Amino acid sequence: MRLGILGSGLMGAKLGTIFARAGHEVVFSYARSEDKLKRLARKAGGKARAGTPREAAQDADAVLLAVHWLRFDDVLERAGDLSGKVVITCSLPMNEGDTELVVARTSSGAEELARRIPRARVVAAFGTVPSEVLFGVYERRRRAGRPSLVCCGDDRKSKNVVVKLIRDVGFDPIDIGPLRMARYTEPFTMLIARLAYEVKGGPALAYRFERL
Ligand SMILES: NC(=O)c1ccc[n+]([C@@H]2O[C@H](COP(=O)([O-])OP(=O)(O)OC[C@H]3O[C@@H](n4cnc5c(N)ncnc54)[C@H](OP(=O)(O)O)[C@@H]3O)[C@@H](O)[C@H]2O)c1
């Protein structure tokens, strides 16, 4: 697949690298330094390259939006027309200090994003785990007992694309239904962040649902 990364920080850099190693054609974009994007592309190997947000989005089958909530307007403007594209968001609607969700309960960051780009097909995925766990999950992908990863969105075909990417990273995908379910996954991520960063054991934390 051709994948555009909009935001090459903790999440975008790691997911983009894993996507490239899994054989996808990746364009890293939207960092404050072009050198960083080039370095990332070199390190990721495969068919990865650096580009502008517009180049990342242009021919992409899917784009990953991995920026702070306060940077949405800027990155979307730079990416240009996303009509018809699968837009995967791992972003949370956090305040400037990253202490609170600024959208919750009656809406979600993912739904607000979908309202801003109504012709795109928004799927929320990857945002429920800390970036620190991603490489570990990829390395363990051939072992039994993969960790779960929830995703939600209103378009079935787009979710199928995302489910495949979730598998490529090494998770067991769980489609939890329409995009409005992000109203529950986003606060759930606050719980995961608490466990990852504030409770003993370290941030390389994933979750796994089991039916008994
Ligand atoms: N980190 C996590 O573990 C985690 C987990 C779940 C969800 N999330 C969500 O995922 C999203 C991305 O998080 P992150 O931790 O990956 O953020 P991050 O590390 O801060 O990355 C954001 C990216 O945006 C770029 N950027 C920021 N300001 C810019 C500007 N003025 N011009 C151009 N580029 C700019 C950064 O550039 P530089 O590379 O130059 O810094 C970076 O590449 C957030 O919405 C967050 O809530 C994060």
Image (cartoon, rainbow, N blue to C red):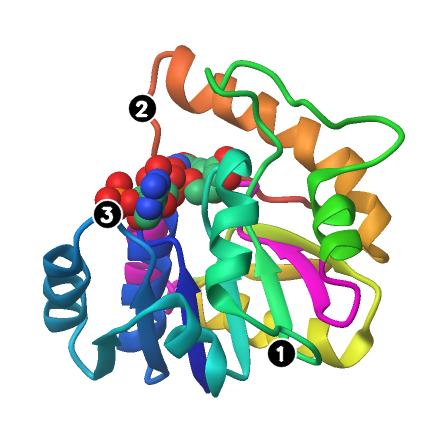
* Distance from Cα at disc 1 to Cα at disc 2: 31 Å
Q: Find residue 110 and report its horizontal and vertical position in percent.
A: 71, 47
**137 or 153, nearer to the observer:** 153
Q: How crowded is mark 2: few (under 14 residues within 10 Å), some or many (20 or more)?
A: few
Quadrant observed for ligand 1 in the rendered image: top left
Q: Give the range drawn in magenta.
A: 117-143
Q: Where is residue 125 in the image (x, y as percent from the top left)?
A: 60, 55
Please tell me which residue lies in front, 114 or 132. 114
In what element is the residue under mark 3?
loop
For label 1, the SS is helix
Q: Is mark 2 within 8 Å of ligand 1?
A: no
| Residue 137 relative to residue 49: left or right | right
The residue carrying mark 3 has its beta carbon less than 8 Å from ligand 1: yes
User: Which amino acid, by three-letter code, is at mark 1?
Assistant: Val
In the image, 208 versus 112, the foreground residue is 112
Name the residue located 75 percent from the left edge and 81 percent from the top edge: 157
- Disc 1 within 8 angstroms of ligand 1 (CB): no
Q: Position of residue 134 (x, y in %)?
A: 36, 50
Disc 1 marks which residue? 161
Look at mark 2 in the image and give the residue it sits on. 202
Compared across the picture, whether 76 is left or right of 24 comes to right
